[in-house]
Image: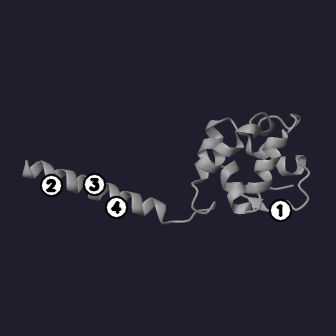
Amino acid sequence: MESKAVMCLCFLAMLLVAGLGTVSGAGECGRVAVDKMALKLAPCAAATQNPRAAVPPTCCTQIRAIGRNPKCLCAVMLSSTARQAGVKPAVAMTIPKRCAIANRPIGYKCGPYTLP
């Protein structure tokens, strides 16, 4: 019985240590994981694959919010979640312009891409 309690305490301690390591850091999107932030761009799916596709207003709303932090926007558009969803980065980079976002970070380098 005692060894079971010790094992349980050790397991809980490991979970606590593992959780502290991931929560304390701030990445490109602050405390929100880039891949989690990428999920907010679900309304942009068609627009990230076809440069002629209409960009829905809900997509533009999300791009406007995420685009306040250009590092986050780049990280989201180049994330593994976006890649797995079939996002074409060269096309995705055009969405802020296609949404007619006036204060978008024009010329911002995003990996091998530049925001138009």
How far apart in space, not on screen, are marks 3 and 2 (Cα)? 10 Å
Circle 4: residue type: Val
Which one is in front in this view, the residue at disc 4 or the one at disc 2? Answer: 2
Name which residue type carries label 3. Answer: Leu
Residue shown at the point (9%, 51%) measured from the top left: 3
Question: Which residue corresponds to mark 1?
Answer: 105
First in sequence, mark 1 or 4: give its number: 4
Secondary element type, mark 1: loop
> How far separated are the C-alphas under marks 3 and 1?
45 Å
Residue identifier under label 4: 17
Among numbered discs 3 and 1, the one appearing first in the sequence? 3
- Find residue 49 and report its image quarter: top right
Of circles 3 and 4, the one toward us is 3
Mark 3 surroundings: few (<14), some (14-19) or many (≥20) residues within 10 A: few
Q: Which residue is mark 3?
A: 12
The residue sitting at 68% across, 45% down in the picture is 40
